[in-house]
Amino acid sequence: MGKKRHTVEEMFAKLRQVDALTVQGRTEAEAVCQISMTEVAYYCCRSTYDDLKCDHVRRLNGLEMADARLP
């Protein structure tokens, strides 16, 4: 089975889900496990996308794709 790659919007949504679960009293590790994501992937995602808003994430993703197409 191959690796699943989450889209930027999915990662952003998962960060918000973990935030909501930790507010309800769960630990961060329990919340990450509940959303079916590894802790390593969560912390990498959080370090990249945590301070951004959803529209900023979409713009960043578009810029990265455009940059990849340049020779």
Image (cartoon, rainbow, N blue to C red):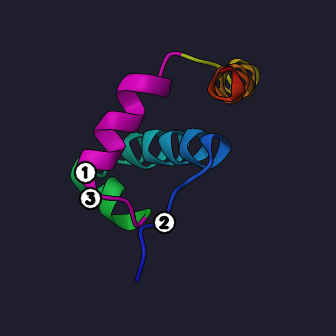
Q: What distance separates the C-alpha of mark 1 from that of mark 3?
A: 10 Å
Q: What secondary structure prevails in the magenta region?
A: helix
Q: Amino acid at mark 2?
A: Lys
> Mark 1 belongs to which amino acid?
Glu
Query: SS of the residue at dot 1?
Result: helix
Q: Residue at x 30, y 52 (%)?
A: 26
**Above or below — where is 37 with respect to 27?**
below
Give the magenta range.
36-51
Q: Earlier in the sequence, mark 2 or mark 3?
A: 2
Q: Which residue is nearer to you in this view: 33 or 45?
A: 45
Between residue 29 and residue 25, name the one nearer to us. 29
Residue 30 got which mark? 3
Can you see residue 42? Answer: yes
- Please say if the residues under marks 2 and 3 sit with CB atoms less than 8 Å apart: no
Question: Residue at 40% across / 83% down in the picture?
Answer: 1
Residue 53, relative to residue 24: is it above or below?
above
Does the CB distance between marks 1 and 3 fall below 8 Å? no
Decide if residue 27 is on the left or right side of residue 3.
left
Nearest to the observer: residue 61 or residue 42? 61
Report how far apart the C-alphas of labels 2 and 3 lie in the structure: 21 Å
In the image: residue 13, left or right of residue 4: right
**Does the CB distance between marks 1 and 2 fall below 8 Å?**
no
* Residue at numbered disc 1: 39
Q: Amino acid at mark 3?
A: Glu
39 within the magenta span: yes
Quarter of the rendering occupied by the C terminus: top right
Give the percent coordinates (x, y) of residue 49. Answer: 50, 26
Q: Is 52 one of the magenta-colored residues?
A: no
Upstream in the sequence, badge 1 or badge 2? 2
